[in-house]
Image (cartoon, rainbow, N blue to C red):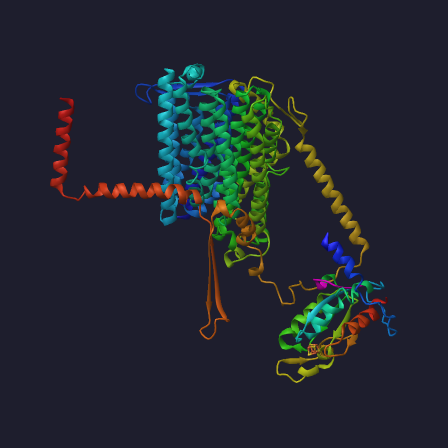
Amino acid sequence: MTWIGAIRRAGRIVEPAPSAPSDRMAPPAGVTGSLQLRHVDCGSCNGCEIEIAGAFSAVYDAERFGARLVASPRHADGILATGVVTRNMHDPLLNTLAAVPQPRVVIAVGDCAVDGGVFRDGYGVVGSVADVVPVDVEVPGCPPTPAQIVAALRSVTGR
Amino acid sequence: MSTTAGRGALVSGGSTTAVGAAGLVLGLSSIFGGGVHLRIGWLLPLVGVRFDVDPLGGLLIALTGAVAVVVGVYAVGYARHEHWSVLTLVLLPTFVAAMILVPAAGTVTTFLLCWELMAAASLALVLADHRRAAVRSAGIVYAVMTQLGFVAILVALVVLSAAGGADDFATLATRGGAVASGTRTAVFLLTVIGFGSKAGLLPLHAWLPRAHPEAPSPVSALMSASMVTMGIYGIIRIDLQILGPGPTWWGLTLMAVGAMSAVFGVLQASVATDLKRLLAYSTTENMGLVTVALGAAALLSASGAPTIAAIAITAALVHLVGHAAFKALGFLAAGSVLASSGLRDLDRLGGLVRSMPVTTAMFGISALGASGLPLGAGFVGEWLLLQSLIHAPTQGDPMVALAMPLAVGAVALTTGVGIATMVKAFGVGFLARPRSTQAADAHEMSRGMAVGMGLAAASAAVLAVAPGVLGPVVQRVLAVLPAVGGDTAGPHLGAMLRLPGIPGSMSPGVIAVALVLAVIVAVGLGRWGRSRRPAPADVPLWACGADELSPRMQYTATSYAEPLQRVFDDVLRPDTDIEVSHFAESRYLIAKVTYRNRVEDPIERGLYAPVVRAVGAVAERVRRAHNGSVHLYLAYGALGLLVVLLVVR
Ligand code: SF4
């Protein structure tokens, strides 16, 4: 049973939970500890995606605070937007947000999503996420660390 | 022109219905009121024509009559719309009459005469639209195969009547057991080949998926619902009634042929994209199931289990009738789709539920029957068949112990794939959004066609919910089939189906009532729940972020069947081509991807093509002798005369 041995040798690899962030918002669906998010890549360099994957990995484990990534906006309480909004992704972003039931939350992850970041003046760029849809939570950084992302998610899940 | 066409259609459809109604009355009266006998001495020199209708023939006559009534009503509207020629109009009732005469025939000569009349009439009807090349090629295939089948039947019956020393079936039935075993074997094999080709059994099924789609739809309905059952009738009459009970291997042969036909037919149907071709392969499948039941009956009565054999033969008869109802309906519904949109290709249909709601409902009833689910017309027959196979006592016979589980597996596989096939035909063809402008412009056809389909649907529904109506009929038919357990009590077909000696019973009526109640409760609860929730919001359809869904994004028949096609790759042998063309600048940029997928009949390719090639090669040789020179032909004549003179010297 090598895999049982492997599990035992690895032990707990998850980071100990830091204390909950202080600046909280009310959970959109009214339930603490349950936040279903649809991720929308509006034109990111994929750096932010790697960090989001890290935030949901076994080490940072955002799911223990109640945040989950889901496959369909119909199942979601909000969207997790990364990258500058490019022309091609402008309409899909609006369509996706329209498909999320209200009340909903928009979390902008990374400098690009917050204010355009390094791509701000590019020819194919519409603007930051906040220029297109109202943003509730911003996570600055290029890319933000998984710990920062987890902290931002916890400010919404309330755990 | 249009009034003439209309009058012609009315006369043709009306007389078809009249002939059908007469057949229905004749069939039922001969089942319940004793046999009908008729002798016309002058019609055929030397032997005369003789008709004896017993309950078995009566069942087939009544079945054909019922199908013809429905088809006649439907054909009034259809023939007017399609501007049928006078020949076609005349041949439709003729074909029906010939089909009614086949099971009525009391002697071998009469039978052969009627059989050939039926074959010729159906061939001419298949060729109704002979201007299209596909129709002509289907006609040739059908003509060759039906005549080869006729040759087999002719030889078999002539040998049989010579060996039995009589021409009429009644006398032959009493002497059948005394025929030498070698002759019996030869007759059995020849009749299985001949009648099997008419019933669309493997490997002589190839005419079916060609002729059925190309024939006008009312003709397809007649052919598929009643003409193929004449093949089954022949097998029952000659092999089970006259020659039976045969040795064990007869039953095993029938079961093997039937199981292979069922599985192969349903697999081909599952990947077919042509709606009528799909229905045609489904006919092969269902006739295969009936043949499995016949084989099981023969095997079980040979191994000494007549009660279970009676259940199997009941399964065959019930399924024959059920199949006639749902298959006629299926072809008629496909016919109205074809008449309205000009399409048979499922990949281009869709969305008919909104534009043709009646036809959609009709096809739905037919598909439910074809999938063998409860409340479908095919369910009771398949249930009886499975019961007889599962509960067959082995009596220490290893062949029975081996054959029955294998047959159960084949029937189960057939039913499973059959459900997928019918979900495909109904879901892709009728639901969703139209995949082409023709499908979008489709509209409901004439009232007569709807009435015809409605009649067929009503009988399918009655057969599905109350198969008890067949109870008395089946009982009388069983009484004339003592060789396959007909002299036992037989299963009880009433409101509750009870099987003698088997702890199994079932009531489709109760299932139907329970389903209706469940639907009412579910709808009521849904209404009640909705009244307590806030009003629903209107939001756009989720299309993965894109602006709208297009019909091209839907499942097609091909894509739906792709997993099945992959699983059964070895049997279906699909022909798949993927062509990728790149831009000239870079191999990494793709300009176009072409995907082509064709599933041909592997048996046709593997078995028929070499034969056709060989015949072609021989014909080519023979052709060299025909060079058009009159002198040469005169020389041939002189040579021939010389040979004759030498021989008879
Ligand atoms: S913020 Fe940085 S890492 Fe994230 S998408 Fe923009 S450039 Fe990439």
The answer to whether residue A72 is magenta is yes
Please report the residue visible at 38 percent of the width from the left and 22 percent of the height from the top.
Answer: B108
Is residue B247 a member of the stretch shown in magenta?
A: no
Name the side, left or right, on which B305 lies relative to B145.
Answer: right
Q: Residue at x 72, y 54 (%)?
A: A2
Residue B6, horizontal then vertical, whole percent: 43, 44
Residue B101 in view: no
- Whether B237 is drawn above or below B518: the answer is above
Give the image location of residue B579, x and y in percent. 46, 62
Region in magenta? A66-73
Residue toward you, A46 or B62: A46
Residue B277 lies, with reference to residue B179, above or below; the image says below
Quadrant for residue B459, please give it: top right
Quadrant containing ligand 1: bottom right
- The answer to which of B447 and B541 lies nearer the viewer is B541
Picture coordinates of residue B144 (x, y %)? 35, 38
- Viewer-side residue, A43 vs A8: A8
The residue nearer to you, when weighing A96 against B204, is B204
Q: Is residue B593 above or below residue B431?
A: below
